Each structure stands twice: as C-alpha cells, then as structure tokens.
Amino acid sequence: MCSVTRDCLWQPAEQWVRKRSPGSFLHCRVGSGQATYHRFDSRDRQHLITYGVRMIAAKHQPETASGWLSGREIRKRGYFGGELSTLNLLAHTCCHEFAHLLQQSAGQRRRGSVHNRHFYTILDELHESGAAGATREALADQARKQALALPDTPFEPVDTRQHLDRWQVGDTVSFGAGLRELHGQIIRVNRKTCTVDGIGSSKGVRYRVPVQMLSPLTPPR
Ligand SMILES: [Zn+2]
C-alpha cells in the first residue's frame, strides 16, 4: 500500500502539490494498530500517511470490514461498482488518505470539518480520473508478485431481508449510481431490490436499486 500510494497517487500529483507547498514530500509507513491517517507536519513539510496493520487485517473479514468509513464510501458513492472486497477496500483506503493529502494542500482541511464537500470532490476525482483504478490494479499486481492473498471476491451480501424491512413504498431515499448520488421515492419493494422513481435531477428515471445501497433521504436544510 505504501509503494502503490507513492507510485500511483503521489507521483502524478507531486508537481501540483509542490506548487502549492514547495519542498513538501510524502512518507508512508505501516502502523502497528488500527489507526490509519494522513498528517502534515508544517515544520519539515512532511506528509505522513500511516496504514494500520490491524485495519488491514480487519478488512479481510466481512464482519469487521463493513464498519469502516471506506466501506460506506464504496457502497454509498458507488466506487469500484459499489462492491466490497478486501482489494477494493484497501485500494480505496489508499485513495481516501491521499485525498486528505490533496485536500490539505488545497487548504481545504479545517478543524472539525475533515470529511467535507471539498474532500469528497477530490475523492470523486481520484475515482473518475482512473487513479483509483490504477491503484487497485497495482495493489493486485504487487500482491500477486509477493504471493500474498488479496481477495477481490465480493463479501457475501449482508442479510437483505433485514435491510428490506426498513423500507416502505413512499420512502424517499438516496443511492449512488456511478459516482453520482441520486434521489428517489420507493414505488415497490422487491425481493432484493427496491424500485425507485427518481426525484429532483433524476425525475422521470426509474431505478432498481440493491437494497444495501439505499439510505434514507434527509430533507435538505
Ligand atoms: Zn478520512
């Protein structure tokens, strides 16, 4: 993950980052716990990304993988087809931490507002530009070369029954399609999906959405 972050994410962005923050550099390391984060030290201009070894272990088991923000982002924002696997989770984790580096360089990281609008614009761009895909490929490649198991098989879907019980006809929901977040109203609850009529910008379009991708739509404030 460290070398892939440097090769696939840092290298293409290095010039852009240095223009905003001359002399800055990236150091990636593996931490012994769960903690996974980006930190910038303004004195020595070092971006530090730490990947916690226990975070990596947790993302190998469906039961412990789903609770992480990276999993929710993949599902909710449709990254890597919205599919949760160890490979997708770890590749996305590289992108997530690197998005913090870009966010910090752009001056958009604020105390108390870390996962803000700017952050997600950057993260979406990393996925749309193909950088995330390249990261995923490189990780799979490295694992193969080192004979490390890095499964790309999707985790067993969580119990859909339990999810379906949450929804009724008429509920308004949000869900990811590609990289966009769409809004709609449930018109039918199926066996594993809900049929949703788009509202707002997707008015006039009908979707069949896997139930685990649905979230309640909170009315705009
Ligand atoms: Zn974060």
Image (tube, rainbow, N blue to C red):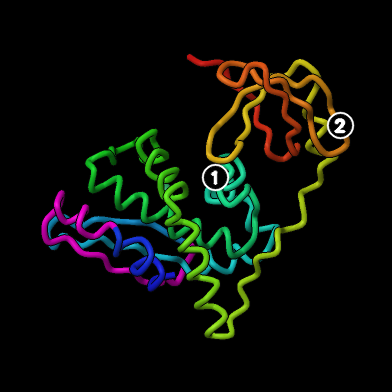
**Residue 33 falls within the magenta-colored stretch:** yes
Residue, disc 1: 73
| Quarter the N terminus occupies | bottom left
Q: Where are the magenta residues, as a range?
A: 13-34
* Residue 31 among magenta residues: yes
Report helix, strand or loop for mark 1. helix
Residue farthest along the bottom direction in this orientation:
146
Give whichever of 69, 181 is nearer the camera.
Answer: 181
Q: Amino acid at mark 2?
A: Asn
Q: Quadrant of residue 188?
A: top right
Q: Position of residue 131 (x, y in %)?
A: 42, 56
- Give the vertical position of 170 relative to 104 (above or below): above
Residue that appears at 53% across and 39% down: 179
Give the distance between the C-alpha atoms of the residues marked 1 and 2, in whole angstroms: 25 Å
Name the residue type under label 1: Glu
Image coordinates for residue 4, horizontal then vertical, percent? 41, 70
Q: Are marks 1 and 2 in contact (CB under 8 Å)?
A: no
Mark 2 residue CB less than 8 A from any atom of ligand 1: no
Task: Give the residue at mark 2.
Answer: 190
**Which of the two discs, 1 and 2, sits closer to the camera?**
2
- Looking at the image, which residue sits at the far right? 191
Residue 142 location, x and y as percent? 50, 78
Identified at 29% across, 56% down, the residue is: 39
Determine whether the residue tagged by mark 2 lies in a helix, strand or loop.
loop
Q: What residue lies at 48% left-to-right and 14% top-to-bottom? A: 221
Residue that appears at 16% across and 56% down: 18
In the displayed structure image, the side of residue 138 where residue 105 appears, left or right: left
Mark 1 residue CB less than 8 A from any atom of ligand 1: no
Q: Which class describes the residues within 10 Å of circle 1: few (<14), some (14-19), or many (20+)?
A: some
* Disc 2 residue crowd, few under 14, some 14–19, many 20+, Cα 10 Å: few
